[in-house]
């Protein structure tokens, strides 16, 4: 069945945690008195974007993670690992609690998930403009099966094959590094929440193709940037250019695509992080949390929420600079272009 490898491919791109069996109970250890300065210095030296928030004798370190890091990117995961080993507790991203039944549902519906309805092609769902842009991106393809792929699967193919996004097949990301350090050093760790696997699977199976149109449109934009798109995003991440990461075509596409693009999932993730952060800030010692950088730094995200509550959030700028305006309130750049 040709569609079965495609299903496995998308699950790998999404990162298996979303559709994995329930994790084993975390190892525990007696919390020690972490030396805050040492932890912060090590974490910052790694090159991963991070922010600190302190309330009384509680300090929270939030690390922004991305997937799809090129294996030859010269960030310093060993320093982040050493910092995580010195924390008192670790907060990890949400995990999907999927049952064997959920996985079999995906396999059973592989054809429905991976292909457009019989007789339909991408041209039946995209505007003339986006179909033309897609045709230009795929002009060199000898196999025309892409025309009949579901918009979701086509989107991930575009990001992987045209924009260089490797997902979980890339080098270790910050989440991998911190989880490994917590296990080895026996630092107490837990996911901040769970997402029910049956809900994720149902949204994948039952969503009409029109739901995935924003996903494929942003994936086309990423593909147009070419195979360097993923590297540029990773280099911006390593250089702490957070607004540029959030604005990158690949990050925009991932935000629009299932499961992140599901309108019922993203607010749930944000609420679970808010609750976990509140708990960590009444727990003495150093808590290190790692989350997708978009969830932290997007407008209205976790960092904006902390700042709105009056916390001093210390770390790299995460907000894009507003365009300069003249006295009449006109965007200066637009004014120059008009001239």
Image (cartoon, rainbow, N blue to C red):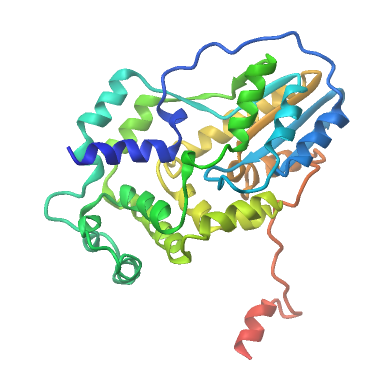
Give the farthest residue toward the left. 119
The residue sitting at the bottom extreme is 339
Residue 136 visible in the displayed image: yes
In the displayed structure, 119 sits above or below 2; it is: below
Is 187 rendered above or below residue 42? above
Is residue 47 rendered to the left or right of residue 298?
A: right
Which quadrant holds the C terminus?
A: bottom right
Of the pair 75 and 329, the residue shown nearer to us: 75
Residue 315 location (% of width, % of height): 78, 45
Residue at left offset 58%, top offset 43%: 66
Q: Report which quarter residue 158 is drawn in.
A: bottom left
Which residue ends up furthest to the front in the rendered image?
Answer: 72
- Above or below, 54 relative to 3: above
Q: Is residue 281 visible?
A: no
Q: Residue 190 placed where, x, y %?
A: 60, 19
Image coordinates for residue 100, horizontal then vertical, percent: 31, 18
User: Residue 24 in the image: x percent, y percent?
Assistant: 51, 13
Q: In which quarter of the image is residue 20?
A: top left
Residue, x 61% and y 54% (percent of image)?
245
Identified at 76% across, 30% down, the residue is 60
Q: How many marks?
A: 0
In depth, the one of 36 and 313 nearer the eye is 36
Identify the image quadrant of the N terminus. Answer: top left
């Amino acid at each position: 069945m040709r569609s079965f490898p495609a299903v496995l491919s998308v699950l790998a791109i999404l990162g298996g945690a979303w559709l994995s069996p329930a994790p084993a109970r975390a190892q525990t250890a007696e919390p020690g008195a972490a030396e805050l300065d040492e932890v912060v210095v090590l974490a910052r030296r790694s090159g991963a974007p991070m922010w600190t928030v302190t309330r009384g004798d509680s300090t929270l370190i939030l690390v922004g993670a991305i997937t799809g890091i090129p294996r030859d990117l010269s960030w310093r995961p060993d320093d982040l690992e050493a910092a995580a080993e010195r924390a008192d507790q670790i907060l990890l991203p949400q995990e999907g609690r999927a049952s064997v039944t959920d996985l079999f549902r995906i396999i059973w519906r592989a054809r429905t998930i991976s292909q457009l309805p019989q007789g339909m092609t991408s041209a039946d769902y995209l505007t003339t403009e986006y179909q033309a842009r897609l045709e230009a991106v795929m002009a060199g393809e000898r196999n025309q099966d892409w025309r009949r792929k579901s918009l979701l699967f086509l989107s991930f193919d575009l990001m992987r094959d045209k924009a260089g996004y490797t997902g979980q097949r890339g080098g270790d990301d910050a989440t991998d590094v911190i989880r490994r350090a917590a296990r080895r050093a026996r630092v107490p760790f837990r996911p901040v929440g769970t997402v029910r696997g049956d809900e994720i699977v149902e949204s994948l199976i039952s969503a009409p193709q029109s739901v995935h149109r924003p996903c494929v449109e942003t994936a086309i934009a990423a593909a147009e940037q070419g195979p360097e798109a993923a590297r540029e995003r990773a280099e911006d991440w390593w250089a702490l250019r957070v607004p540029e990461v959030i604005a990158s075509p690949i990050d925009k596409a991932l935000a629009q695509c299932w499961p992140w693009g599901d309108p019922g999932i993203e607010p749930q993730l944000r609420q679970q992080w808010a609750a976990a952060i509140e708990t960590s800030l009444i727990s003495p010692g150093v808590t290190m949390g790692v989350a997708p950088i978009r969830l932290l730094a997007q407008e209205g995200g976790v960092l904006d929420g902390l700042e709105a509550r009056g916390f001093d959030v210390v770390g790299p700028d995460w907000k894009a600079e507003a365009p300069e305006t003249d006295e009449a309130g006109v965007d200066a750049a637009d004014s120059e272009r008009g001239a």
